[in-house]
Image (cartoon, rainbow, N blue to C red):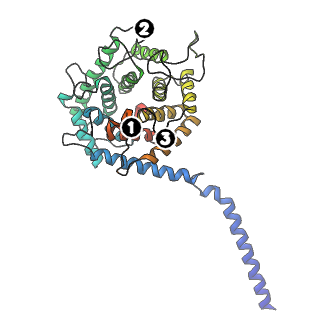
Amino acid sequence: MNAQLSIKTRSLILALLVTTLFSSVAVAQPFDVPDADPAAAFKKDQVDTAINRAINFLISRQHRTGAITDRTHDTTMTALSMMAMAAVGHQPTDPTPYGRAMRKGLEFILREDRQHSSGYFGLADRSKMYGHGIITLTLAEMLGMGLDIEQDKLIRLRLKKAINLILQSQRVYKSYRFRGGWRYTPTARDADLSITIWQLMALRSAKNAGLDIPAKSIEDAVAYLKRSYYSRLHPDGTPVNKVSAFAYQPGGGPEYAMAAAGLLAMQVCGEYKSPLAKGAADWLSKRPPQWYQRWFFYGTYYYAQGMYQRGGEHAKTARTIVQSMLLKYQQRDGSWFAGNSSERSYGRVYATSLGVLSLAVKYHYLPIYQR
């Protein structure tokens, strides 16, 4: 009798324990899972790994001179590589292989033979105003990251001269269609959006760093951006077509890379609520990037950063698209190489730097890309 009761009692207790255990698990589960989507957490880890592999590739391409390049435009590619490294948290002062690579790269860019006496960076490596804008933007973002006070003074000196050249170039007489923009050379009388955005971002970054940038220069550049919008505008500045985008030059049709460039440029200039920015983001949502399309890396850099600035569903969708595509096409050595003929001649350092900058939206280290 006592044995039977003992067995029944033990069975009852066991049943109650099992029931309690499963009930506890059912209640605790939502709180125990750190990410609602385990696949998303896995992708985040993959992105970190992809970025590390890409950065390691970039420093493996550094020459004894300090330049990071595998094809042409050595100063510009070095600047682009350094911006990619800074975008994921590395600094020239870090006691790491990445910090040492950035120090050597910065010393190379600051060499006297890299910048013309006029302040022009686009002459030494034949990168024209493209390179000038990229290098100037990099120096503006590097201001305060020098190894010592003397190097910071040199960065500021080179930066001021570069900024002055950008301002002088904008003031060159141009017809109304091109006024406020920039083109291939400092004395050009026309303009295009692709080159304009680099000068504009350099000016904004320099302003953020405390340099005196005339408000009119930014206003004139924004006016040029608006004239590059494909849709006609009402007298109040709102577009006739609410979903439209930016063109390479005023009067042209929209395309992926320029739509993304215009979107980022408008927001960098503080035009977050502009219907033109919203229209471009909606236009891009209907035409997401494709691996083999022209200027994929160039456009995707702007797309990732521009959509991040938009926030919400635009940012979430763009980040998923960019991460999935770049993870799929990363090479074994950590690099990326363009799938389209328009970018192949620029090499792997070019594509890899832009690939890292596209993925770096998850970090938000560089001031120019912060909301």
Q: Earlier in the sequence, mark 1 or mark 2?
A: 2
Question: What is the quadrant of residue 198 in the picture?
Answer: top left
Q: Which residue is mark 1?
A: 354
* Place of residue 74 in the rendered image (x, y in percent of width and height, measured from the top left): 25, 34
Question: What is the quadrant of residue 286 in the picture?
Answer: top right
Q: Which residue is mark 3?
A: 322
Q: Residue furthest front?
A: 341
Question: What is the quadrant of residue 10 in the picture?
Answer: bottom right
Mark 2: few/some/many CA within 10 Å (<14, 14-19, 20+):
few
Q: Which residue is mark 2?
A: 176
Mark 3: few/some/many CA within 10 Å (<14, 14-19, 20+):
many
SS at mark 2 in the image:
loop
- Identify which residue, 199 or 147, lies in the foreground: 199
Which amino acid, by three-letter code, is at mark 2? Tyr
User: What residue is at 39 percent from the left and 21 percent from the top?
Assistant: 196
User: What residue is at 46 percent from the left and 18 percent from the top?
Assistant: 225
* Place of residue 117 in the rendered image (x, y in percent of width and height, measured from the top left): 19, 20
Q: Earlier in the sequence, mark 2 or mark 3?
A: 2
Which amino acid, by three-letter code, is at mark 3? Val
Residue 346 visible in rendering: yes
User: Separation of disc 1 and disc 2 at Cα?
Assistant: 33 Å
